[in-house]
Amino acid sequence: MDHFLYKNGVLCAEDVPVAGIAAAVGTPFYVYSTATLLRHFTLFDEALEGIDHLVCYAMKAASNQAILKTLAQAGAGMDVVSGGEYRRAKAAGVPADKIVFSGVGKTAAEIRLALEGGIRQFNVESEPEMALLDATARAMNTVAPITIRVNPDVDAKTHAKIATGKSENKFGIPISRAREVYRLAATMPGLRVIGIDVHIGSQLTDLAPFEQAYRKVADLTEMLRADGHEMMRLDLGGGLGIPYARDNQAPPLPSDYGAMVRRTLGHLGCEIEIEPGRLIAGNAGLMVSEVIYVKSGEGRDFLIIDGAMNDLIRPAMYEAWHDIIPVVEPVPGAEQAKYDIVGPVCESGDTFARERMMPPVASGDLVAFRSAGAYGAVMSSEYNSRPLIPEVLVRGDQFAVIRPRPTFDEMINRDTIPEWL
Ligand SMILES: *Cc1c(COP(=O)(O)O)cnc(C)c1O
């Protein structure tokens, strides 16, 4: 459920007509709904009611300061995967004890940054990282709270590029070696081992792989306790999927997920952390674009729009499907047209949809990509020297630009010319 609906024949973001935002900021742009962001966060928070828990938004999904602040004010913690994200979380006012540091390649500088600024915990992904973290913490006369990310070897049944929980993936340590690695961690005075972390992938549309993984985590928790380790916290990762196509089978509800967490892990008395990204931000954002040309092709027409793969890379990178709708509500029962929807970038991969049936649109019309809030703006680039597109946040009947479109001069002047030229 989101807050992008047709009202009086025009698509609105909450109470703001999308065409009005387009007139103010130009196309293409991203627009996010505050009510949708908060609704999704609250659903998760309520799903775990009664268990000691923290919802740490995986901010790599959408990391604009205004989005982080919206969620932080509602009580969210943050899952960060880089020093840059750590700084962003701090800048948005997230308290250090609500920031979790994940990622396979934390550098010495990033580790120092988080130890200096404070951290809820590091989710450690390898033995070399453990050794560096231990040495760094000791050199700083401090102790780093850690969980160890275990790879439970379950098939998340999602796109290969976003599956992370099989033994061939680069993430975590194999669960079969967990006891040995925990034993080693316990000998390191710079570390305080407080729990287990697991994250098996993204855009999962079924609870079964989660349940399989969490049962393994439950068994491991009891085994590690028997070995004498303190196990107070379980970080269960993110990964719950969203419906990209409206006729898709609906992914599990946060409430069903919460019930499954209780069922599999509730008896352990651990504090639970979850790290949803996509499910909080995905359906809270649209990318809005204008049709430049409708070009006739053989057996199909091409809709050439001013948004491109550099603005929204998911279709090119993951074969992702986005619902693409006209901003003016189509007349009910109107005939559908068949389009290949493409951007202007000089790559055949700059294709958003092939042979897509949708209401006919014309040059100058606006179209909206639904479910573009997560892994949209954050993955954008300036390929083809196309400026990063603006981000807009709506709340009720108000909207604000939360990242302006850079000018061409700003973009060009970021380059510096060596003296010899
Ligand atoms: C990407 C990621 C998440 C969030 O995944 P979503 O599918 O967006 O919920 C959570 N935890 C970790 C460690 C991640 O890498």
Image (tube, rainbow, N blue to C red):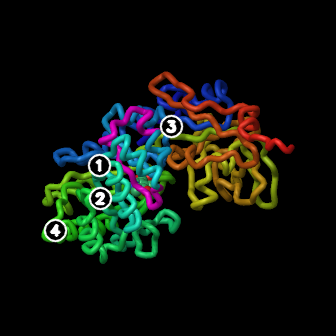
Q: Position of residue 305 (x, y in %)?
A: 72, 44
Distance CA(mark 1)–CA(mark 3)? 31 Å
340 relative to 49 in the view: left or right: right
Q: Nearer the viewer, mark 2 or mark 3?
A: 2
Q: Is 155 situated left or right of 162 in this image?
A: left
Q: Nearer the viewer, residue 277 or 256?
A: 277
Label 2 or label 3, whichever comes before in sequence order:
3
The earlier-in-sequence mark between 3 and 4 is: 3
Tag 4 residue: 222
Q: Nearer the viewer, mark 1 or mark 3?
A: 1
Marks 1 and 3 close (CB-CB < 8 Å): no
Give the quadrant of residue 413. top right
Residue 197: image quadrant is bottom left
Q: Which residue is mark 2?
A: 147
Region rendered in magenta: 88-107
- Which element carries disc 2, helix, strand or loop? strand
Residue 101 shown in magenta: yes
Height in image: 415 above or below 132?
above
| Total numbered labels placed on residues in the image | 4
Q: Amino acid at mark 1?
A: Thr
What secondary structure is marked by label 4?
helix
Identify which residue is drawn at 45% across, 50% down. Answer: 110
Q: Quadrant of residue 46?
A: top left
| Labels 1 and 3: the sequence-earlier one | 3
Q: Is residue 227 left or right of residue 78?
A: left
Q: Secondary structure at mark 3?
A: loop
